[in-house]
Image: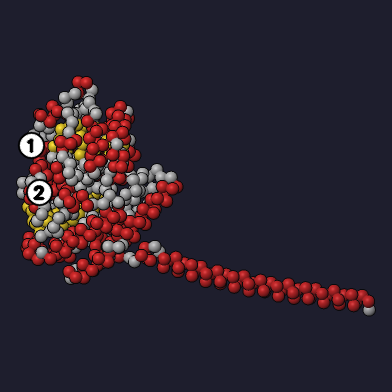
Amino acid sequence: MRTAAWQPLVWVLVLLATDMPDVQAASILGFAAIGARSHQYCMLRIGQELSARGHTFTLLVSDLENLSVLELGSKAFPGLNVVAFSGPPGVGTKEWYEQLSRDLTTGLKQLQHEMISGAHHLYSDKATLQKLLDADYDVLLRDALYWPAALLDDVLGIPSIDVLSAAPFQPMFGYYTANPNPVAYLPQLGSGLTPDMSFLQRCQNYLQKVLIEQIPMRLNAGKQRQFMRESGLRVRTYEQGYSTSVAAIFAADWALEYPHPVSPKVHMVGAVMADDAKPLPADLTAFLEQNLAEGHGGMYVSMGTAARLTQQEMQGLSEALSALPNPVLWKVSAVQLPKNMSLESIAAANIRFTSWAPQNDVLGLPSLKAFITHAGSNSIHEAAYHGKPVICIPLLADQFDQAARAEYHGFGLTVMPAKLTSSQAMSHAIKRIMSEPHFAANAQKVQKRMSNKPRHPAQVAADIVERVIATGGDPYLATKMHSLSWWQLSLLDVKLFLAAAGAVMCGIIGGLVWLVWKLIQGAVKRCLRFHGQSRHQAVHNKIS
């Protein structure tokens, strides 16, 4: 019997229909850290995928950022809604970025201060909060590092999902998402270490964990609790504030991350911002490939949005770049320049400045030879996705760790900012990256790992959001870590009980042994006494 030509198509449609999640169009709110562009970009990319599936996506920003979000170009998308609240003044400005400390603990304390300021501004803006309540959102995508976003759980009463454009930082996310933290081989935030640690490095890694736990995490806990009490919000510990999320989406890829255990609700979806490259404008391609016939491919330089170099560092970097035969595209704006410094002072014939560039597309240009970067997570992910070697200049927070990952996987070198004051260190790094073929080979190896995926990471992230919506925010993947006290988690009560029980058992056994010993002693004495009496009687009988 012949099968009708349309029957296979029917079966395909049936299978596709049954495979789709049972989710109707939902209203989704996203809230990323104020002033953190890379966090907002990651949130927007996931929102774009959700919008393409028929959902409504709204991004909550401060009023100072509203215009910049609307002008995001390729990062924005049709249907994007923006709600602005009265944010803290100065955040995200040139002066704000320049004041960020390169010291990890000081920088984290500065960011915590800004979070408290942002929380005060958001939760005192009653009109915006009421607007959010009236919108009746179904789920909240909240920045995993921005605790004021976690407090919206109480205000809106909806399920929440943590989102971060990087891997789970330790030791913070060991508490936030109940993630195991094997300090013996998992580098802690800001350490710049790799899993191959010596004894002294393991000591350093452990001290780094203790330092972060005690300074930026613990010292700010009191201020946060004070804010919660003043705002009438539910008072909870620093860790409990984050533990309310139903799921956690981390835009990190196991092709780059160090293997380590994660809790069930943590999803490492991959590099959300990395994608297949689109064609560059003709003039930009022509500039980067102008010396390709002589074997001098182009280079791309970008220090992100938050990182700032000093005048001496900018001058040293410029000297190293201007001595190259390679064309250099340098993304830098006047806002990123130090005071009393102009682009003209670092200009050269082979350098082209631009205030903005489609970074993913530039890195996807086959002829591009290398990327000089601040080692932000998105930049490292995009470079790895396109198989480009990197020279890292880490300045803040996890950038030291991202640079270490690039070196660990063999496609990167690190030049510390202090060595930029002279062009020698950067010139040497560029020479190595360009002349030693293993850097490009290792970059291609990582690229193959990252590209071997059936679905884009943004699609995987959207699947997780839809699953949370479909299950009504059921926290079935959450562990019991945050419902237990510290002494229960450390099994202190169990250990004390077992120690006490062991002591009692030892006492009982010792008592029994002592009793048996005494009984044996008594029996022996009686035997000896009886034996002595018997001998005495025998001698007496013999004499008589």
Sequence-earlier tag: 2 or 1 = 1
Seen at 32% across and 52% down, the residue is: 170
Residue 6's mark? 1
Q: Residue furthest left?
A: 79
Seen at 7% across and 64% down, the residue is: 127
Dot 1 crowding, Cα within 10 Å, few <14, some 14–19, many 20+: few
Q: Secondary structure at mark 2?
A: helix
Closer to the camera, 424 or 125? 424
Q: Secondary structure at mark 1?
A: loop
Query: For the residue marked with disc 1, what is the amino acid?
Result: Trp
- In this figure, which residue is indicated by the disc labeled 2? 68
Query: For the residue marked with disc 2, what is the amino acid?
Result: Ser
Seen at 20% across and 39% down, the residue is: 302
Residue 334: % across, % down: 14, 42
28 sits left or right of 184 in the view: left
Is 528 above or below relative to 476?
Answer: below
2 vs 1, front mark: 2
Whether residue 372 is visible to the viewer of this picture, yes or no, is: no
Closer to the camera, 170 or 326? 326
Dot 2 crowding, Cα within 10 Å, few <14, some 14–19, many 20+: few
The Cα atoms of the two marked residues, 2 and 1, are separated by: 50 Å
Is 88 above or below relative to 78?
Answer: below
Residue 423: % across, % down: 28, 34
